[in-house]
Amino acid sequence: MPDRHLPVRPDLQQLKREARALLAGIRAHEAEALADLAAFHRKPIDPDTATLADAQLVLARSYQAPSWNRLVLACRLTDAIWRDDLDAVHALIERHPRLLHESALVRPSNWGPPMSYAANLGRDQIIRMLYEQGARDLESAMDRAALQSEVRTAEMLYDLMGRPPLPEGILAGPAYTLSASGTEFALRVGARVTDEQGKRLAAPDVVLETDSRDPAAKHAILEMYVAHGLALPDTPTMALHRGRLDLLEAHLQRDPALLRRTFSHKEIYPPEIGCHDEVQATHGTPLAGTTLLHMCVDYDEYEIAQWLLERGAEVDRPAEVDRDGFGGHSALFGAVVSQPNFWMNHGDRPVQARFAQLLLDHGANPNAKASIRKRMHPGYGDDALYEYRDVTPVEYGMRFSHRLFVNERAMELILLHGGGRVES
């Protein structure tokens, strides 16, 4: 059986419930529970005589912990850090000093050992105590603080490090999370966007390809890069990425057909700034061969979308169709399946469908047809290639493989505007 994945803030009571449920499954000879028992127990066990301790061991090992007690320690340590309970963290480290240098979540994790874990949350007192106890993951902790926008904590850690030259990759973390304040911190204390030979050290490729969505922060980071000397392509797509309506206006003056143009993947994600793998560019509905309006939907660029429509962009302009017949989708398909929808659903944010409403208000066809092929980023646990043939926007949303990318409210609006339902 595949390993389970411990969440960033594990819940000990939930794990206890899982252990009891696993024991019940083992005793009931359920196939999945027996597979776990065979895969993760140290010795053969008769399911009928299995104990809670057996189930706890199996569960712990499936979470990549060597024992139930070690899993419990991870829960207590991380919970104390979340609660900013200095005394509780200190007591755990005093009793178990090895915890200082092990992953706080036991499993390999970007959140790192306890000091780095605490840096993600801006727990400065805990960090100082851990440093005094011998923790030395200062660089990792500073990086985590910067990408989480915990700038005060990043400053403190940089001081503890002795303010050395910064590592080359320091800008990548804040680029991934679109932390404008983390980027500003790194640049302020000496991060460079290029080296002496002109090699790019900034991370504009990460800014463009990340699954994070925050237009204002994205614009700010790219403008900081430019202000510090990084050259970005002078293209309409980069103007959109930068949020620069003035640059878009200039491109429109030079190319009156701009609003009808479609752009290749390489034009949207330029190789010259480090973009290279189409799957790594995280978005919902495919963007290759689409218009600026399509881009606005997946990048949550509402004001630019309004600007484009006010200047005459075709609301139903289809994407290019590839040699296999896939493509041809209008921007409305992106309003149904998009990266911003993922964060709305995953983070339990208020449900809204402003792009669907905007497009429908401008006459978008609720029954447009397209065939779409989509491979998900492997970070979503599935890199299979999915095909949706001859679908309307609503049919596309109903059939889409990963529900967190789907905007149910957008589909409701499309239905209210005469969109067709899935055929039975």
Image (cartoon, helix red, strand yellow):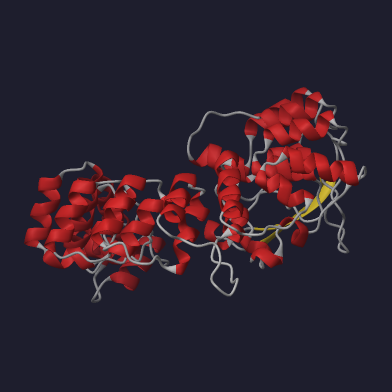
Q: Is residue 284 visible?
A: yes
The residue positioned 15% from the left and 68% from the top of the image is 98
Q: Is residue 16 rendered to the left or right of residue 409?
A: left
Who is closer to the viewer here, 24 or 67?
67
Up the image or down, 11 lies above or below 190; here it is above
Who is closer to the viewer here, 218 or 35?
218
Task: Return the x and y of residue 270 as percentages of the image width and height.
Answer: 71, 62
Q: Is residue 171 rendered to the left or right of residue 325?
A: left
Quadrant of image for the C terminus: top right
Q: Is residue 51 visible?
A: no
Who is closer to the viewer here, 418 or 375?
375
Task: Return the x and y of residue 132 as percentages of the image width and height.
Answer: 13, 60
Who is closer to the viewer here, 405 or 276?
276
The residue positioned 11% from the left and 53% from the top of the image is 90
Task: Return the x and y of residue 34 as percentages of the image width and height.
Answer: 35, 65
Up the image or down, 392 lies above or below 31; here it is above
Q: Is residue 262 rendered to the left or right of residue 179?
A: right
